[in-house]
Image (tube, rainbow, N blue to C red):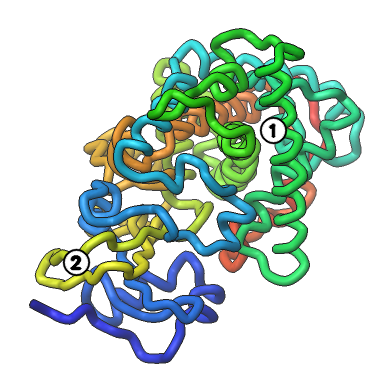
Amino acid sequence: MQCIPRIKGFDSTLALLKNPYGYISKSSGTVGADLFETRVLLQRTICMTGPAAAQLFYEQQHLCREGAMPKRIQKTLLGEGGVQSLDGAAHKHRKQMFLALMAADRIAQLQDIFGYLLAAEVEEWMKKPRVVLYDEMKTMLTKSACEWSGVPLPVAEVALRSHQLVALYEDAGAVAWRHWKARLARSRVERWAAEVVMSVRNGDLQPRAETAIHVIAHWRDMEGALLPAEVAAVELLNILRPIVAVSVFIAQAAHALHHNPAWHQKLRQNEEKQEETLENFVQEVRRLYQFFPAVAARVQHDFSWQGYRFTKGSRVLLDLYGTNTDPRTWNNPKAFMPDRFSAWSKDPYTFIPQGGGSHQQNHRCPGEWITISLMKTFCDFLVNAIDYELPTKLTQLCTQDLPPIPQRGVVIRNVTLR
C-alpha cells in the first residue's frame, strides 16, 4: 500500500486562494500523481484531480457529503439541511423532488419566460448609453426564476431579491465583510423563502401543481412528514439561486464570443445545425471557463484506491476545473474548441462543471439542463436578434475571483435590433 504523496508546507490555504483553479492540478503534476495530501484551513485534506478521481468522488461508495463543506460555505452558498449535504437513500429521495421539476416541457417554459424578457428589454437597452450584460442578466434571471417557480415577486422587491440571491454565490468564498454580507443575505432570503413556503401550506398562495414552490412546499421526507419550513426554504433557494447564477456563465459566454469572433459568425450562419452548434458552444464555455474550483466530501470508512490508503474522516477536495481541462481527456485542453463536443463520448466523469456521474443517482446537478438551455437562449439572442458595439476590448478573466466574472460585466452600447 502506497502513502498518499504530501506536498511541502504546513498548510495550503493561502496557495489555494492565490490560484484556486490551478492549484490542485499543478500540485498533482509536481508529485506525479492524481492526488496529494496537504492541510486546508488547518485540516488534513486529500486533493484529487482527473476522471478516475471524479468517478471515485461521485460513485458514493466511500465518500459522503455530510459535514464536508466548510461552515462558511454552508452559511452562504448552500444553506443547511439541503440536498447537497445528504447521502444514500435520503439524498436519492430528496433528489427526486428536483428531478420532478426538470421535465423537458418545464425547462422549455423557463426558456420562453427568459426569451420573452430578453426581447422586452431590448427597447430599454436601445435607449441606454451603455448596457452591462452581467447586471442585466442578474435582474432578468431573478424575474425568470421566480415566475417559473411560482414565487410572487413584486416589482418593488426585484432589486432586493436579486441582490440577496447573487450574494449567495458571488461572496460564498469571500473573506471579511463580504463573507458576513453573504451570511446576512442568506439569513434574510431564507426567511423570505420560508414565508413563501408557509403561504402555500396555509392556502394563501395557490400556485400551479407543476411549479417548484408547490412541489417543494408539499414534498414529504422518507417518513412521510413535510419538510421543515426552514429546510423547504433552503431547497427553494436551491432552485432560485442556481438559475440566477447562470448570469455568470452568460457573461462568460459573451466574453468567449468576442475572444473567438469566428464563433460569433458561426452561430449566425450555421442555421442547418443551429441547435448542435449552440450546444457545442455553451458546453465549451462551461468546460473552459470557471465557476467554482472544487467540491468537498469526507471519507466515511477506511478504503484503498489505486494502491493508496484513505482513512475515515479525511476531507477530500475534487478539482473540477482541472478535470474539465485534463490533457488525458481533452486534446489541446486550454484552447477554445467547441467542435470537440461533437465527438465527446459523454463520459459523465470527464466533464463535471456541475457535478459528475448520474443526474438521477449521484451528486450531479439536474439544474445543468437549465443552465445549458438558458445559455443557448442568450447566445442565440446576442448573435441573431441584436447588433451592438463593445466600447472597450474585453480582457482576460481574473482567476483569483470566485467565480471569475468578465471585466465590468461585459459592457455593450449602441444596441439595435437586427
Q: Is residue 327 visible?
A: no
Q: Is residue 162 visible?
A: yes
Query: Which sits in the foreground, 232 or 242?
Result: 232
State the image coordinates of residue 203 (x, y, percent, origin top left). Answer: 71, 12
Q: Residue at the location (48% across, 31% down)?
A: 372
Task: Using the image, determine if residue 4 lies above or below residue 258.
Answer: below
Task: Using the image, determine if residue 107 lies above or below residue 229.
Answer: above
User: Which residue in the structure is indicated by mark 2?
Assistant: 302
Residue 371 horizontal side relative to residue 191, left or right: left
Q: Residue at the location (64% across, 19% down)?
A: 148
Q: Looking at numbered disc 1 in the image, what kind of residue is underneath it?
A: Ala
Report which quarter residue 207 is drawn in: top right
User: Which residue in the structure is indicated by mark 1?
Assistant: 194
Q: Looking at numbered disc 2 in the image, what kind of residue is underneath it?
A: Asp
Classify mark 1: helix, strand or loop.
helix
Classify mark 2: helix, strand or loop.
loop
User: Rounded to the nearest whole Å, what is the CA distance between mark 1 and mark 2?
Assistant: 39 Å
Circle 2 Cα neighbour tier, 10 Å, few/some/many (<14 / 14–19 / ≥20):
few
Q: Which image quarter holds the N terminus?
A: bottom left
The circle on residue 33 is none
Q: Residue at the location (35% across, 45% down)?
A: 87
